[in-house]
Image (spheres, rainbow, N blue to C red):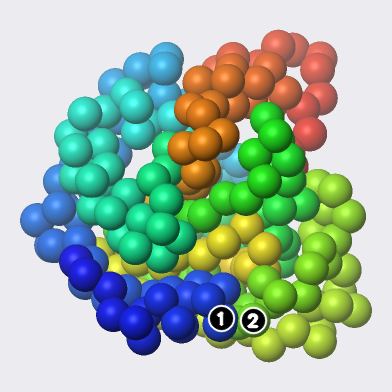
Amino acid sequence: MKLSNFHIQSYNENGFLVIKKFFSKKDIQSISKELNQIINSNNKNIYLYYTRSKINKKLILNRIENFYENNKKIKNILDKKLKNVIYQIIKTKVNLFKDKANVKSPGAVGFEPHQDLTIWNNMYKIKEFITVAVTIDKSNKKNGCLEISPKSHILGELAKFEKAIPLRKVKKLKWKKLISLPGDIVIFNDKTAHRSESNTSSKSRRMLFLTFNDIKYGNKIRKYFNDKIKNYPPNNLRKKNIKYNWKI
């Protein structure tokens, strides 16, 4: 897909860009199928994170990580198209920094308002990141759609390191709920404030979040996930009597 000047201007002015029907129905169905197989495959190289349901306190699947480099079918669908559209925006080639599929099962809690830069800023000496969110399931108000604050990327750092944006600042920001359909994507940078509410529906709301860095900073994905499982491992790799602290 070739972006217009309007697309690029919109991204630069608002800190994010929504592109409808970026991926075909067939592509999304293939990704959905692969995600389901991953859950049942017991592949130890792909990390499954579980949490307690807000509804009944039962253990539910929350997210899947490190699937991109461990599933050729998903990578083949995403890789070239995403890197191409990012190149058109920031005029440089990129490497994947990290990936996750937010499963957001029924009862899953939302994500507090935050900027990614408060977590990854200068990590491995990388100065900036760009993320693409890919809608797998219909996303709406009831299942906790992604919300973004337009123009928040020009306001600087809104929170302390690894912290959510303070409520007094959240109230001053304008927020936009991004209702989306399978195949739609959202591109935003690490300074753009975003959040989501809990899933109060009866179905999961899966969305992929793929974060990239300029190739001049190298390929850090293996280092990132090696460090990640040391600090916050998936449930099946956790040791007893150790408290692991999740970061935004």
Q: Which amino acid does label 1 sit on?
A: Asn
Between 142 and 171, the one lying in front of the other is 171
Q: What residue is drawn where x is 21% and y is 29%?
A: 72
Q: Can residue 36 be seen in this view?
A: no
Question: Above or below — where is 230 with respect to 6?
Answer: above
59 vs 243, left or right, is left
Question: Which is nearer the N-term, disc 1 or disc 2?
Answer: 1
Q: What residue is drawn where x is 65% and y is 21%?
A: 227
Q: Position of residue 116 (x, y in %)?
A: 67, 54
Q: Position of residue 31 (x, y in %)?
A: 22, 45
Q: Which amino acid does label 2 sit on?
A: Lys
Dot 1 falls on a residue whose secondary structure is helix
Question: Above or below — where is 168 with respect to 60?
Answer: below
Which mark is on residue 145? none
88 vs 75, left or right, is right
Q: Which residue sits furthest top?
A: 239
Which mark is on residue 151? 2
Mark 2, Cα crowd under 10 Å, few <14 / some 14-19 / many 20+, is some
Q: Where is residue 235 in the image (x, y as percent from the top left)?
A: 59, 24
Residue on which the image places disc 1: 14
Mark 1, Cα crowd under 10 Å, few <14 / some 14-19 / many 20+, is some
Question: Above or below — where is 188 with respect to 234?
Answer: below
